Image (tube, rainbow, N blue to C red):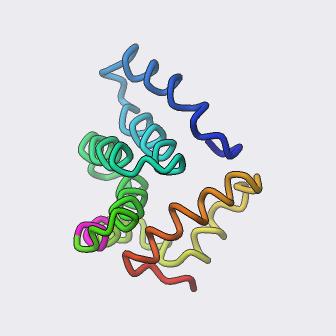
Amino acid sequence: MYRGEPGDGIAPLEQAIQLAPNDPNLAIAYWALGTCQLLSGRVDQAIDLLQTASAADHWLWVPYFYLAAAYGLRGDLDKAKSALAESIRLKPAIRSLARMRAENRWLTDPRYQALQVKTLNVGLRRAGFPDQ
């Protein structure tokens, strides 16, 4: 996913979920799978998986964050804003795209960054997430 090849992560993540359906980190697996789908442009699949991730762990901020982007891309702005508000409530430090980049300096692969710019960032902006 972070190498800019999210499609390569889908089958292994689906297999991991099948092999360990009661794993305590299941929310992370669903988040990663939803993110792979989002970065691949499959917004509806991403939404389903990210909703599952947020339901699996209500205290994990990142599924809400990516869910906000997915809803934003789909044009469901009320849901996007609600998911974004929940993400910010759970992780107040991430309040802008600039702050997100600062928190994730290790995400340097240009292929990943190109996908993020046209999916995650677009959806978050539509949800009202500021650049600065």
73 with respect to 81 (left or right): right
Marker count (numbered):
0
**Which percent across, then down, holds residue 5?**
65, 40
95 with respect to 68 (left or right): right
Seen at 43% across and 55% down, the residue is 62
Seen at 41% across and 76% down, the residue is 126
56 and 123: which one is in front?
123
Q: Quadrant of the N terminus?
A: top right
Seen at 71% across and 62% down, the residue is 105
Q: Main secondary structure of the magenta part?
A: helix
- Above or below, 23 against 120 in this view is above
Residue 80 in the magenta stretch? The answer is yes
Seen at 42% across and 57% down, the residue is 66
**Which percent across, then down, holds residue 121?**
53, 68
Residue 83 occupies which quadrant of the picture? bottom left
**Which percent across, then down, holds residue 84?**
35, 69
- Above or below, 15 against 55 in this view is above
**Which percent across, then down, holds residue 58?**
26, 50
30 and 44: which one is in front?
44
The residue lying furthest to the top in this view is 19
25 and 54: which one is in front?
54
Residue 31 in the magenta stretch? The answer is no
Q: Quadrant of the C terminus?
A: bottom right
111 with respect to 124 (left or right): right
- Above or below, 36 against 129 in this view is above
Q: Which residues are magenta?
A: 79-83
